[in-house]
Image (cartoon, rainbow, N blue to C red):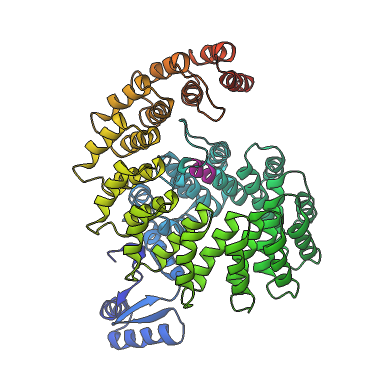
C-alpha cells in the first residue's frame, strides 16, 4: 500500500477483490463466494488474518507480510523476468537499504534467489555510501553481513565474504577523523559502530575457525571497553553450546578487567540461568565485587532473572541502603521500584532514599521512580514540590523540577510555578532547569521567548544565561532576531561562558551563513580569552575541516597562542589545536615536526606531556 511495509492494513473490499481475481483464474464459478469463505477461514481457523475494525484486515504476524512481499519480488525477478538484476539491486535494495523495516524482506530475497545473484546484490550493498547516515552509519555493511548469512551456498561467495569480513573487522577500530568530545553524540556513534561490527562478525562468521580465537583476543587485548564487552556478548551468544564457553565465562567473571567482568556476569545471568553456580556467583558479585559497575550489573540481573527467589528482595534492600557506592544503591532503588512496587516497604524506602541518602544519584533516581510509579498517589505532587525547593543537591532539585514539568504538565499550577522558578528563585540551578523545561514543554506560550531572552541577557548567573542561549538557539532558530542576538553575545558579552555558548550555537546552527566562518576565525585567533578561543577552535575543526587555511590557522594557534596557565583545570588552546591536528591531519608532512617541537619547546608543562605521550604512540 502507500505506506509500504509500515502499512499492514487492507480494506475488506480490496482483500476480497484480490482473492476473487486469483480464484477466477483457477475456478469457473463462484469465485467471490469462495473468497469470502477463504477470508473467514484465514481469520478464524488459520489465524493468518485478523479483523482490525472499521472494515480493515491485517496480517496477525508481520512475518507473513514480509514473506509475501519478498516472494513477489523474487517472482518478478526469476519467473516473470519483469525485474532485471540491475533493477533488483537499484530499485529494491537501493531504494530500501536505509529503512530497517525493509531489512527482513531484503534478507528473505537474498535467501530465495540463486547464490550468484545474491553475491551480486551483496557486492552492490558494499559499494553504497553508508558512513553519512547519522545513527545508521555503515548500515549497508551490516545489512550485507545479515544477507550473507542467509545465502544458500556461501562457499560460492568466498571472495565477497572475505572482502566484507575485512571491512567489518576494520570497523572495530573505527574513529571519526575530527576532534570530538569524549561523551557527546559523536562518541556514542563511534561506540555503536564498533559494537555492531563485532556483533556482525560474531554472528555471520560463526562457523569460521578464525572467528572464535579473534573474539577471545578482543576480550583481553583490545583498547576499547565497548569492543571487549561486545566480544564477550558475541562469544556467549554464538558459542553457548561449546563445552569451553561456560568455564571461560566464569573465568572472565573473576578476571582483572572490570569491563570484561561486567559483560561476563551479564551473559552468565542471561544465558546460563539454570546452571547451579550462576545464582551464587551473582549474589557474590552483587555484594562483594570490588568494582561498582559489576555489583550494579549483578543487582540488575538478580532483580530481573530471580525475582521470585526468597533472597532477592532482602538482598536488594540491603544494596539499596548499605552498599558503599551510590550508583549501586541507585540501581537497587530502581529495581525495587519497578519489580516490587506493591511491597508495603518499597514506597517508604524510596522516600527515605530520596531525602536522606548521601549520594545525589540515589536521591535523583528515587525521585524519578516515585514521580513515575506513584504519580497517582495524592501525596506525590506536594512532596515533589517541596523537594524541588529544599534539597541541597542541584541534581536532585533538577530531577524534581523535571518530573513535575513533564508528569504534571497539564496541572494549572505547573506553568506559573515554572515561570516563577525561572525568573525569581534564588537557586541558579533551579532557574536553569526551569528555563529548559519552559523552552521544551511550553515553546508556544507567549511568555516563554521573552523570559528566555531576559535570562540570556540579564540573569546574574553565567550558567543560567548560557542555558537560555542554548534553548533560544535550538528552539527559535527561525526567529529573525535570533541570529543577530547570538552574534552580539559571541562578540561582546562580558561573561565568558555565555560567549562560548553563543559561539557553539552559531557554528552548529548557522554553519552556512556567510558571516559564521569569518567570525569563528576572528574569535579563534584574536579573542582575549581562552574560554572563547577554545570553542571557536573546536568548532572550526568540527565544521570546516577541509576549508582552505584551517590547517595553517590551527598550526598557528598550536605554536603562538599566548595562553598562560593560572589554574590546573584550565584548557590550553595550544593543546586543543595540537590534538585536533593529530587527529584530523595525521598524514600532513608538517604534523610530526610540529608535535616534536611542542613536546620539547611548549612553555606549558601539560602541553609538553601531552605531546610526548602522542609521540610515543605515533607509529
448 sits left or right of 205 in the view = left
Numbered range of the magenta stretch: 187-193
Q: Is 190 included in the stretch rendered in magenta?
A: yes
- Which residue in the rendered view is the most extreme toward the left? 480
Location of residue 336 in the rendering, given as x and y in whole percent from the top left corner: 62, 69
618 sits left or right of 578 in the view = right
Residue plotted at (26% across, 45% down):
477
Residue 271 visible in the picture: no
Residue 335 visible in the picture: yes
Q: Is 231 included in the stretch rendered in magenta?
A: no
Foreground of the two, 66 or 232: 232
Q: Quadrant of residue 82?
A: bottom left
Foreground of the two, 102 or 132: 132
Location of residue 202 in the rendering, given as x and y in whole percent from the top left corner: 62, 49
Q: Quadrant of the N terminus?
A: bottom left
Q: Is residue 238 above or below residue 57?
A: above
Q: Is residue 280 above or below residue 488?
A: below
Location of residue 163 in the rendering, given as x and y in whole percent from the top left corner: 54, 37
Q: Quadrant of residue 2?
A: bottom left
Q: Main secondary structure of the magenta part?
A: helix
Foreground of the two, 89 or 165: 165
Q: Quadrant of the C terminus?
A: top right
Residue plotted at (69% across, 52% down):
292
Location of residue 499 in the rendering, given as x and y in whole percent from the top left corner: 35, 33
Residue plotted at (39% across, 69% down):
408
Q: How many marks?
A: 0
Q: Is residue 170 above or below residue 403?
A: above
Q: Quadrant of residue 350?
A: bottom right
173 sits left or right of 495 in the view = right
Amino acid at each position: 500500500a502507500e505506506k509500504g511495509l509500515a502499512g499492514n492494513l487492507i480494506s475488506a473490499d480490496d482483500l476480497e477483490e484480490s482473492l476473487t481475481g486469483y480464484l477466477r483464474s483457477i475456478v469457473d464459478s463462484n469465485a467471490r463466494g469462495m473468497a469470502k469463505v477463504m477470508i473467514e477461514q484465514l481469520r478464524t481457523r488459520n489465524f493468518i488474518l485478523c479483523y482490525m475494525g472499521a472494515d480493515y484486515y491485517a496480517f496477525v504476524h508481520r512475518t507473513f507480510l514480509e514473506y509475501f512481499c519478498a516472494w513477489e519480488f523474487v517472482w518478478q525477478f526469476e519467473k516473470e523476468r519483469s525485474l532485471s538484476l540491475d533493477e533488483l539491486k537499484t530499485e529494491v535494495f537501493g531504494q530500501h537499504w536505509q529503512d530497517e523495516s525493509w531489512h527482513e524482506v531484503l534478507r528473505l530475497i537474498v535467501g530465495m534467489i540463486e547464490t550468484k545473484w545474491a553475491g551480486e546484490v551483496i557486492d552492490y550493498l558494499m559499494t553504497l555510501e553508508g558512513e553519512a547516515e547519522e545513527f545508521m552509519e555503515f548500515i549497508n555493511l551490516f545489512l550485507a553481513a545479515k544477507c550473507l548469512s542467509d545465502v544458500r551456498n556461501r562457499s560460492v561467495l568466498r571472495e565477497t565474504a572475505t572482502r566484507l569480513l575485512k571491512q567489518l573487522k576494520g570497523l572495530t577500530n573505527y574513529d571519526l577523523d575530527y576532534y570530538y568530545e569524549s561523551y557527546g553524540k559523536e562518541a556514542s556513534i563511534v561506540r555503536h559502530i564498533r559494537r555492531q561490527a563485532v556483533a556482525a562478525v560474531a554472528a555471520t562468521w560463526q562457523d569460521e575457525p578464525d572467528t572464535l580465537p579473534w573474539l577471545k583476543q578482543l576480550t583481553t587485548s583490545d583498547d576499547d571497553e565497548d569492543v571487549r564487552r561486545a566480544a564477550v556478548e558475541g562469544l556467549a551468544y554464538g558459542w553457548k553450546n561449546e563445552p569451553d564457553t561456560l568455564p571461560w565465562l566464569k573465568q572472565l567473571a573473576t578476571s582483572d578487567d572490570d569491563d570484561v567482568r561486567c559483560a561476563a556476569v551479564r551473559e552468565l545471568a542471561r544465558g546460563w540461568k539454570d546452571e547451579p553456580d550462576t545464582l551464587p556467583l551473582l549474589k557474590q558479585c552483587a555484594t562483594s565485587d570490588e568494582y561498582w559497575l559489576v555489583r550494579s550489573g549483578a543487582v540488575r540481573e538478580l532483580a530481573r532473572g530471580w525475582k521470585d527467589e526468597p533472597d532477592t528482595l532482602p538482598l536488594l534492600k540491603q544494596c539499596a541502603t548499605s552498599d558503599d557506592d551510590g550508583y549501586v544503591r541507585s540501581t537497587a532503588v530502581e529495581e525495587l521500584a519497578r519489580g516490587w512496587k506493591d511491597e508495603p516497604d518499597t514506597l517508604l524506602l524510596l522516600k527515605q532514599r530520596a531525602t536522606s541518602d548521601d549520594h545525589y544519584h540515589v536521591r535523583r533516581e528515587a525521585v524519578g521512580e516515585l514521580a513515575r510509579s506513584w504519580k497517582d498517589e495524592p501525596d506525590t505532587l506536594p512532596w515533589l514540590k517541596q523537594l524541588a525547593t529544599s534539597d541541597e543537591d542541584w541534581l536532585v532539585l533538577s530531577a524534581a523540577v523535571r518530573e513535575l514539568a513533564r508528569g504534571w504538565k497539564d496541572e494549572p499550577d505547573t506553568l506559573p510555578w515554572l515561570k516563577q522558578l525561572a525568573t525569581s528563585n534564588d537557586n541558579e540551578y533551579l532557574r536553569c532547569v526551569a528555563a529548559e523545561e519552559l523552552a521544551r514543554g511550553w515553546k508556544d506560550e507567549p511568555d516563554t521567548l521573552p523570559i528566555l531572552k531576559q535570562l540570556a541577557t540579564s540573569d546574574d548567573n553565567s550558567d543560567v544565561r548560557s542555558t537560555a542561549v542554548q534553548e533560544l538557539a535550538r528552539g527559535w532558530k527561525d526567529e529573525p532576531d535570533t541570529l543577530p542576538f547570538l552574534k552580539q553575545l559571541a562578540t561582546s558579552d562580558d561573561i565568558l561562558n555565555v560567549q562560548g555558548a553563543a559561539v557553539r550555537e552559531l557554528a552548529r546552527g548557522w554553519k552556512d551563513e556567510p558571516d559564521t566562518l569569518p567570525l569563528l576565525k576572528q574569535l579563534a585567533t584574536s579573542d582575549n580569552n581562552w574560554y572563547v578561543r577554545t570553542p571557536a577552535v573546536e568548532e572550526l575543526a568540527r565544521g570546516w575541516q577541509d576549508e582552505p587555511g584551517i590547517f595553517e590557522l590551527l598550526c598557528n594557534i598550536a605554536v603562538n597562542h599566548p595562553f598562560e596557565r593560572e589554574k590546573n583545570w584550565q584548557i590550553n588552546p595550544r593543546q586543543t589545536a595540537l590534538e585536533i591536528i593529530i587527529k584530523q591531519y595525521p598524514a600532513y608532512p608538517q604534523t610530526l615536526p610540529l608535535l616534536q617541537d611542542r613536546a620539547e619547546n611548549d612553555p606549558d608543562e601539560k602541553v609538553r606531556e601531552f605531546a610526548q605521550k602522542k609521540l610515543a604512540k605515533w607509529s
